[in-house]
Amino acid sequence: MSLEKAIQKYYRGLYPVTKILQYIGITIIAVLMFFTAADVIIRNITSFLNTIQIGSTFSIKGWYEITEFLMVILVAFTLAYCGIEKGHVVIELILNRVSKRVQAIVSIVTNFLSLGFFAIITWQSALYVTQITRSTTVLVIPAWPFVAVVAIGTAVLCLVFLLHFFESILQARNT
């Protein structure tokens, strides 16, 4: 099997995974927007009632903790989709002035370093899952599932960087 066909097959398998993670992220954004708006409205109404001596200020209990954890899921699960769509920042100002071969070589190095960096994050997050005993103070939600989400999200991102690494090798070979 040629490298081109292997890359296409790899992409066809990886893209649906990143798309599912993206949909989870979209759902989390919707949940965050709804509950944040509800919390603000509740706080404003109860604050108003408090000023006219009817009640006390009220907020959704533990919402700050829930927001923190939902943001972890949101970021971890949407990184891979952004990566597969090549939505991350690329410095084109300098790269557009060099040959396609040099661009491919820079891309090889960048993807290799990114793969290594996020592989370390994945590895350390996976190790941390087994060691963490912390939970939140208000709702007593354990933190380890959210560290596991980071490990899963960065592992999928590593697969995306591996795909881009091989695409860059193919591009360098063809120029």
Image: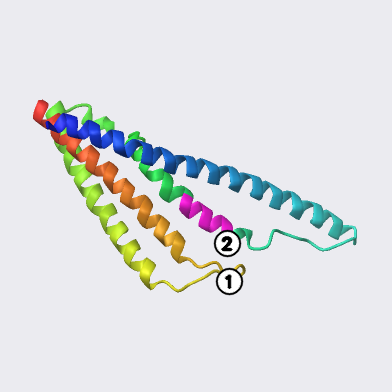
Image coordinates for residue 84, horizontal then vertical, percent: 33, 37
Identify whether 165 is placed above or below 154. above
Can see residue 102?
A: no
Count up the numbered dots. 2
Is 62 included in the stretch rendered in magenta? no
* Residue ID for mark 1: 137
Towards the viewer: 174 or 89: 174
Q: Amino acid at mark 1?
A: Thr
Outermost residue to the front: 1
Q: Is residue 165 left or right of residue 19?
A: left
Image coordinates for residue 124, horizontal then vertical, percent: 31, 63
For the N terminus, the image quarter is top left
For the C terminus, the image quarter is top left
**Span shown in magenta:** 66-73
* Residue ID for mark 2: 65
Dot 2 or dot 1, earlier in sequence = 2
Q: CA distance from mark 2 to mark 1?
A: 9 Å
Packing grade of label 1 (10 A; few <14, some 14-19, many >=20) is few
Please report contact status of discs 2 and 1: CB closer than 8 Å, yes or no: yes
